[in-house]
Amino acid sequence: MKNFWFFVLALLLINEKIIAFDSCRKEKQLFFDEKLFKEKLIESIEDLKDKNESFIKNKDVLVEYILCLDIYYKYFEKDGERKKKEYKKLIDYLESLLKENDSPEIYYCLTILYGRYAEKCNIWDAVKMNIPNKIKKYAEIVVEKKPEIDGYGAFLILGRLFYITPKVPYYTNWQSFEKSEIFLKKYIEKNQNSITGKLFLAETYKANKKFDLYDSLINEIVSTTNFDNFQDKKIHDSITGNMK
């Protein structure tokens, strides 16, 4: 009986930590105070670093941890080489976890990290390292096994990947603006307020020479005042800033 209650307490503590992470990442009032948001983000990340490896291997916590790190490195870490090294270290670690636990959550985290790592490389080097194919493969596994992870984030990743990847014979013949449009529309169906999704779809429309649809989505983004996440607000600020 004592062991049972210890187990229940452990579950409660883990669930509490997941809720705390969500509130940090998605608490809208923090988006307007970047300094405070950064402080809360660092607190969450540092708190997880203090936990043991088995805690990190909790799949729900792992996804939340990677999402928080992604925000921090993208918007607050200025050292490009440090970012690249950290992405590579996390990639190697999660690839090793796949040998023990073939879970869609790990695949999803790897799609994010490979994408960020590729951003720090020359685009052609990324293609030579087979990164686009790896992201595509892993995101497709997530779509097949558990598409709802991170609000159907694999749809967003595939939609962007089909748009941004250069078509290189024998490497990435699968690049397609049409498929990009399909996946991004699927993502927006599930996340109707997503500025990130709408911007990516707008850029795909532009590539497909659908300029009226591009203009319509950009105007929709500019008029938005309600943001689902920090990245959406940053995209909105960037677009409206460029229009001034």
Image (tube, grey):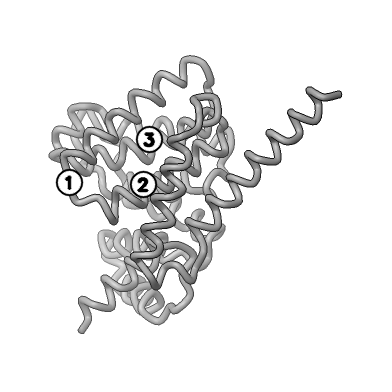
Residue 63: x %, y % from top left: 49, 40
Task: Give the class, few, some or many, for how many residues have Cα within 10 Å of label 2's Cα (few <14, many ≥20).
Answer: some
Mark 1, residue position: 79
User: Looking at the picture, which amino acid does disc 3 mark?
Assistant: Lys
Taking the image as shown, residue 177 lies to the left or right of residue 18, namely left
Residue 147: x %, y % from top left: 56, 42
Q: Nearer the viewer, mark 1 or mark 2?
A: 1
In the image, residue 122 sits, relative to residue 170, either above or below, namely: below
Q: Nearer the viewer, mark 2 or mark 3?
A: 2
User: Looking at the picture, which amino acid does disc 1 mark?
Assistant: Asp
Q: Residue furthest bottom?
A: 244
Q: Does label 2 or label 3 sit earlier along the sequence?
A: 2
As measured in the structure, the alpha-carbon distance from the residue carrying label 1 to the one carrying label 2 is 14 Å
Mark 3, residue position: 136
**SS class of the residue under badge 1?**
loop
As measured in the structure, the alpha-carbon distance from the residue carrying label 2 to the one carrying label 3 is 19 Å
Residue 100: x %, y % from top left: 51, 16
Q: Residue furthest top?
A: 99
Mark 2, residue position: 70
**Where is the C terminus found, in terms of image quarters?**
bottom left
Residue at 32% x, 51% y is: 177
Residue at 37% x, 61% y is: 231
Viewer-closest of 213 and 73: 73
**SS class of the residue under badge 2?**
helix
In the image, residue 182 sits, relative to residue 117, either above or below, namely: below
